[in-house]
Amino acid sequence: MESNEEIRRLVNAIALKNASEHSGSTNVNTVLSRILSLKPELKNELKTLIEEIRIIVDSVNKLDLEQQKKYINEIYSVNINIDSKSRHENIDSHTLPELQLTGTEVVTRFPPEPNGYPHIGHAKAVVIDEEYARMYNGKLILRFDDTNPMNEKLEYYEVIKSDLEWLGVKPDIIKNTSDDILMLHEYGKNLTRNGDAYICTCGIDNIHKFRMEQIECPCRRNIDNSESNLERLDKIFGGAYHQNEAIIRFKGNMQDKNTVMRDPTLFRIIEVPHPLLGDKIQLWPTYDFAAPVEDSLDGVSHALRTKEYELRNFLYQSILDKLHLRKPIVVEFSRLEFDNMPVSKRKIKQLLEDGLISGWDDPRLLTLSAMRRRGFDPKAIRKFVLSLGLTLAETKPPFKALESMNRKIIDPHAIRLFFVKDPIKLIVDDGKNIKVTLSNHPTNDLGKREVEVSTVFYISRDDAMLLAEEEEVRLMELYNIKIKNIDLENKRVITASYFNNDIVREMKKIQWVSDKSVTKYSILVPKDLYLNDKFNPNSLEIVEGYAESSVLQLKSRIPIQFIRFGFCISEEKKSAIFIHR
């Protein structure tokens, strides 16, 4: 780690450069932001660092502009990289548009709140974040936005990391917003002391009423009474107020048509233990405050946000302006949603509480855990996200497009087997006891399997209902038979006789399972979770039937294509989950 003298030289260089670019004046917040983006490890020495910066800023501001430029050119231009002006060339061809570059390293961030399991919407965000970081040889920060202990659990931190690892995402830095809570407190105090925020003790109902009626809160008048405002400031940071008794609000514009700017909440008291910090902290910043400050201090060059934050971007920029902090470039894109397949954590939690789904990995959901369990390949998700590009258009792509990409990836290594649902017995009265060798894949070398057959088979009821007496059909990959008698209601049996082994292109083909190589098997078939914005009680079907007994020899989590049924992922010895056709 650098010596104190080296840190002072770097701080001095930053202060001189910033002052020379802004009419001879700089400030503590700007210099602090830049030094922490270059040396994040200094956050552990924040008090000492701020005092050192204050002394240097005062010294630099006493110089005239010509002196500042002279010093920055003559003394601090050597071996002090305060700009990181390394432009990365040879950017690979991507579906994403190029970013507007600022001359600094490209740094993106993915800031999930650990309040649930990540879903495909999060996948879109983090894949775009990572792709841009890699396009420009930059960095990706995974930052847990953990400033609301009421909703957060340790479990969610780990699940998010695990799901991103499965998705193939490799952050360069992993951190928590809560790591910087004391620093965020300092910025909150600065904002309040400067008259850009105030302590509000009005009730929740009154706050809402005033905002809707565009009336300034009575507490806002305390901004003009610095003594009263500072007294309240000491009380809220000193723990004198309890939950819902006081908040810190941004001094916005109560007449603004953008309701976000009508004095929004920046800090609130939450008397619930934090999953990482326990009871140490009770005054927590909102995402509206923490996100811009953290982005600036973490050195984020491009803050990629979904379009839902569009109106909040004004607040994002305003907070950084008031704190004199560096502003990242904000890049917006549309959310990823599908019809009848909600991704809202609130909705999912309600479904869990009501016992309507089995867990966060219920195969009807679009959480990454659920999609992994259902058999989607992470490469298909990444490919799908990038195929959408970076657009603001609020369209819901067809889920079949994702299925199509997944199909192309899993098809080459999915073993083909026979499965018949709602089985009907088929007796070939002159059939023979023989063993046949079947390929596990029509084109790729996935091995072969040996199946023993006799005179008794099982076929699906769907196929049986389409048969007619005296009709000639082919048992797939075996031989041709002629139907003699059909009884589907009483004995549930069909009789037939061996016809020949000629391959006739126009002949009807049906799949089968031999009674010499059969096992009971069930397949879980997920369907649309919602229909017309209401929970679909028939969204999960269990299909029972018979499968070839060789399925029992497969390891779990192996993709299978049950011929004429669809792709499935084996889950247990005698069950699977339907992926798609």
Image (cartoon, rainbow, N blue to C red):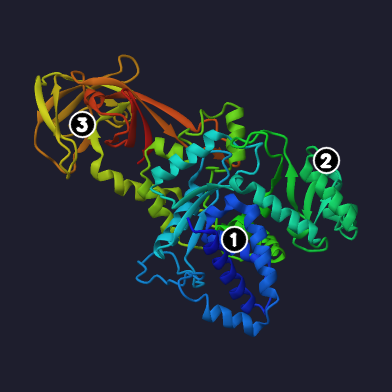
The label nearer to you, 1 versus 3, is 1
Q: What's the residue type where badge 3 is placed?
A: Glu
Spot occupied by residue 375 in the image (x, y as percentages of width and height): 37, 38
Residue highlighted by disc 2 = 245
Q: Residues within 10 Å of mark 2 (few under 14, many from 20)?
A: some
Q: Secondary structure at mark 2?
A: loop
**Above or below, comparing residue 442 to residue 470 in the picture:** below
Q: Quadrant of residue 152?
A: top right
Whole-Å distance between the Cαs marked 3 and 2? 82 Å
Disc sitting over residue 495 in the figure: none
Mark toward the start of the polypeptide (2 vs 1): 2
In whole angstroms, how far apart are the C-alphas of marks 1 and 3?
A: 75 Å
Type of the residue with mark 1: Ser
What residue lies at 33% left-to-right and 14% top-to-bottom?
A: 490
Residue 46 vs residue 154, the one in the foreground: 46
Is 188 in front, or is 304?
A: 188
Q: Earlier in the sequence, mark 1 or mark 3?
A: 1
Is mark 2 in CB contact (under 8 Å) with mark 1? Answer: no
Residue underneath mark 1: 296
Left or right, residue 263 beside residue 278: right
Q: What residue is shown with label 3?
A: 471
* Of 540 and 502, the residue lying toward us: 540
**x%, y% of residue 556?**
31, 29
Q: Is residue 478 left or right of residue 51?
A: left
Q: Nearer the viewer, residue 88 or 238?
A: 238
Q: Where residue 402 sits: x, y (%)?
A: 40, 49
Residues at marks 2 and 1, CA–CA distance in whole angstroms: 30 Å
Question: Is residue 567 rendered to the left or right of residue 435?
Answer: right
Q: Amino acid at mark 2?
A: Glu
Image: 56 above or below 432 = below
Question: On screen, 167 above or below 322?
Answer: above
- Determine if residue 253 is in view: yes
